[in-house]
Image: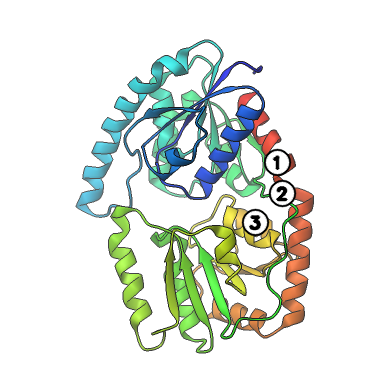
Amino acid sequence: MTAGSTVLFLAHTGQVSGAEKVLLDLIDEAERRGYDTVIACPSGPLTDRVPTATRHIPIGELGLGGERGAARGVAAARMSARWVTAARAVRTVARAPGTVTVVNSLFALPVARLARPPRGASWLVHDTMTSAKQRVVVRFARSAVRVAVSVSEATAVPLRAAGLPVVVSHNGVPWPVPRFGGELHAPPVVGILALLTPWKGHRVLLDAVATLPEIRVELAGGSFPGDRDYVAELHERASRSDLAGRVEFLGHTDAKSALQRWDVVVSSSTSPEAGPLSVLEAMSHGLPVIGTDHGGTHEFLADGAGILVEPGNVAALAAAISTVIGDSNRRRALGDTARHRVASRHDIGRTLPELLHRLTD
């Protein structure tokens, strides 16, 4: 791809979480390098943050939105119809000479298959393929994937098993950045920066903190409409006597502002994360991170850059939190190793140009 070409980005949502933050960085990088940029996604916070020079093609929400039970079947039928409508909306741009199509999420992949860009599409993989529904979507769209760019080695494994051409290009975060942490807040604060959806493991974290009476916990992140019952469940759990007054829901908030409030950061996902940006952000600021031992989280925190615990294990998570809170030397050592890991492997000044090259070459 050469300067003067067009990059068409496909996204399934108009919300902003880790995957969309990476997308926004890629758009900025593409424009700095002289490319025309187009984004096809639902209207929302994401489109409010794209550069003014980026053309927006509005499409419907392409994900299931957290629906369950019978509502999930209805949501799947609507999603399929939206794939067709979205493919029609982007087809002219996707098939134009000089356009490269970049798919930013699993549920936008079928749009590329239906739009049929001549060179195929590059898929930036932010999710580890573990479920049957993911495999069905990939099977349907596989013929359209020119290359799958995985953000971790763990996420690349099931993609290769599915027969996709895969390269690995890690996420990055700004570097250098100030160090946070040091003296504990009174009382100490544990934080999690993640969408309020079941697989992110907030319930596991709340149950763990319930056994640690001197600690507060803050949950930063929004939610999908279909997860309203789960959010209500979290609020109900937080109101019980063993947690009452010790849990705060911050909603959508700036990552840096949240991290400055916290002494320990937890990533308690019960399914494997591909390359959680929130973990890298916490590591870059030298905060101790406790994460579940699978997926990209394992790669980020291995060899002393954090503490790894068994997914879903409340007792192990509680023990890890207690250990880190009670040992200032351990917190400092974890932060030192984490910052070195970010500086050497995840400096966005190096990772972002490489990632764009992998997607557009």
Q: Give the image location of residue 73, x and y in percent.
A: 23, 45
Among numbered discs 3 and 1, the one appearing first in the sequence: 3
**Residue type indicated by callout 3:** Leu
Reply above or below: 323 against 97. below
Which of the pair 33/68 is nearer the observer? 33
Q: Residue 280: which disc?
A: 3
Badge 2: how crowded within 10 Å, few (<14), some, or many (20+)?
many
Residue at horizontal 26%, vertical 49%? 72
Q: Identify residue for label 1.
A: 351
Q: Give the image location of residue 74, x and y in percent.
A: 21, 43
Q: Residue 346: which disc?
A: 2
**Residue type indicated by callout 1:** Thr
Q: Give the image location of residue 218, x and y in percent.
A: 48, 72
**Separation of residues labelled 1 and 2 (CA atoms):** 6 Å
Among numbered discs 3 and 2, the one appearing first in the sequence: 3
Reply above or below: 327 against 281. below
Side (left or right) of 78 relative to 104:
left
Side (left or right) of 276 relative to 242:
right
Badge 3: how crowded within 10 Å, few (<14), some, or many (20+)?
many
**Separation of residues labelled 3 and 1 (CA atoms):** 13 Å
**Residue type indicated by callout 2:** His
Badge 1: how crowded within 10 Å, few (<14), some, or many (20+)?
some
Outermost residue to the top: 97
Q: Could you tell me if the residues under marks 3 and 1 are in contact, i.e. CB atoms within 8 Å?
A: no
Residue at horizontal 78%, vertical 66%? 336
Side (left or right) of 212 relative to 359:
left
What kind of element bears circle 2? loop
Q: Could you tell me if the residues under marks 1 and 2 are in contact, i.e. CB atoms within 8 Å?
A: yes
